[in-house]
Image (cartoon, grey):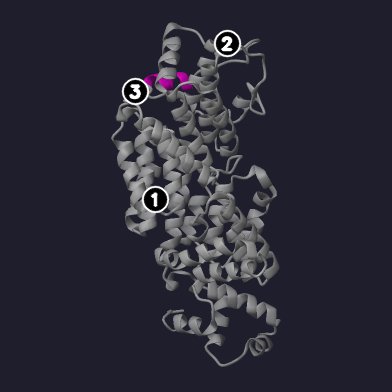
Amino acid sequence: MGGDLLRAASVQTLLRLEPGHGQPIGRHLTLLAEVDPGPAPATWTDARAGVLSSVLAARARRDALGDGLDLIHRYFVDGRLTRPASLSATARSRLYASASEYCSAVGWPQIAARYAAEAREFADTDAQRYRAHSVRALALALNAEYVSAADAVREAHALFAAHDWHDDDVSHCLFLGEAMLALTRADAERLRQLADGLQRTPSDQPYWNFGAAVMRVAAHFFDRDLASGLAESRRLLHASDRARSPRLQRDLLLGMHADMLALHGEFDEALAVLSTGVTHPGHAVCFPMQRAATLLLTGREREVIESTNACVALHDEHCLRTLTPLLTRRAVAFLRLGNDQRATQSMESAVVLIAQTGGSLMPFLMIPSADAARLLDLVAGVRDDLGETIDRLRSALPALAARQALSPALTPLTPTERELAHLLRTTRSAAEIARARGVSVNTVKSQMRSIYGKLGVSRREEALRVLESRPD
């Protein structure tokens, strides 16, 4: 990296990544994001570490992520520098914090959290500790480690309150980490507060403004103000300056946009939108998981299973935050297909993750409450130790169902399901219907479960009441 301008940009950015000096200057970030920091040096020095720290942060904030994790692997192996180093604690803390921020931006929060922990370990000033807690809060929240993320948020706020730092010095990563916590609680009001806070920051930070707008879309989504949410998300996704926004936030926005389309009954458009999304390694945003929600609403349960098999096979390489709703949606698909054992296993795995990570309402926002209640009953029957978590989730289902506000008339039945729905209006039993249609009783029961899920009910009597109000 040569030139006085580049060296000055690196030094200034390095200082401004921590509170007390204002936010990094936009033109410096743009300049640094275009720089190739070169191969790992023979021996690391504070100066070389400082250059890499500023470049990694700039690439994260300017969406220059084309090298993915290869850029990290150029300098690190399993969180350790690949070459000998004679670095101060300060230089190490800054380098690990920037590596963490970059890994979160790339979509690998699991790896980002490890670098953030190292940044916290080596921090020797409160400003460095504040940044380390901030990047750690983001990484942990992205990976659904909500209890630890909330602890990191509290630590960061306590440090900020203890110093005479200006409000403009607040960490962008901390805002995003708090937003992820608000998302998991479906807390629309907190999202609006965070959006207001972001927009009070310096105006030359376009990614802050984009982040604030995404938070407002999420608030509309949780309030079920679908018209406002869809209008704003369309504007953001098609704006001329969208390329200056962080990839992770764009991907989160794309998923929310598709969810709102699905809740609005625009299933084909929702699937078309999701077809443009690219799932990057780490699966911080998992488009197969997003697509599964719409497929369930259209009765395509087998596609849910087939399209998410590869995600499940990733095991611990899959982001926990997106893995939990993926497992829940697979459980619904298995349940409707009549495979109660696989449904129970998938839902059990999801509930275990929810219990271990601090709880999340997100896995239940896009599935019918009747399916969720049945699945929780199945898990309760095999796991007494999960009773407290299951009871808490059960108590939340009515509120979640109210938030879904999905009219049964918007969820189409397949031709086969419409035929069966007509027979359900008669007094025939499942066995009699099976004989009349020339299929097995298990097939009829599986199709009935699919109909119940789409109608948001759990019994035939409830289904009949809803069917009477449907035009089909």
Q: Is residue 32 magenta?
A: yes
Contact (Cβ within 8 Å) of mark 2 with mark 1: no
User: Magenta span has 256?
Assistant: no
Q: Secondary structure at mark 1?
A: helix
- Relative horizontal placement of residue 82, taking residue 184 as reference (left or right): right
The Cα–Cα distance between marks 2 and 1, rounded to whole angstroms, is 43 Å
Q: Could you say where residue 81 lies in the image, as x and y percent from the top left?
A: 64, 20
Q: Amino acid at mark 2?
A: Thr
- Mark toward the start of the polypeptide (2 vs 3): 3
At label 3, the amino acid type is: Gly
Residue at 63% across, 15% down: 40
Name the amino acid type tagged 1. Ala
**Whether residue 103 can be seen here:** yes
> Is 222 displayed left or right of 90 in the figure?
left
Q: Is residue 70 above or below residue 437?
A: above
**SS category of the residue bearing label 3:** loop
Badge 2 or badge 1: first in the primary sequence: 2
Of callouts 1 and 3, the N-terminal one: 3
Rendered position, 259 above or below 215: below
Q: CA distance from mark 2 to mark 3?
A: 26 Å
Q: Residue at x 62, y 15 (%)?
A: 39
Q: Which mark is residue 218?
A: 1
Q: CA distance from mark 1 to mark 3?
A: 28 Å
Residue extending farthest to the bottom is: 427
Report x, y in % for residue 349.
64, 57
Location of residue 333 (image quadrant): bottom right
Question: Residue beneath label 2, please?
Answer: 45
Q: Position of residue 107 (x, y in %)?
A: 55, 38
Residue that badge 3 annotates: 22
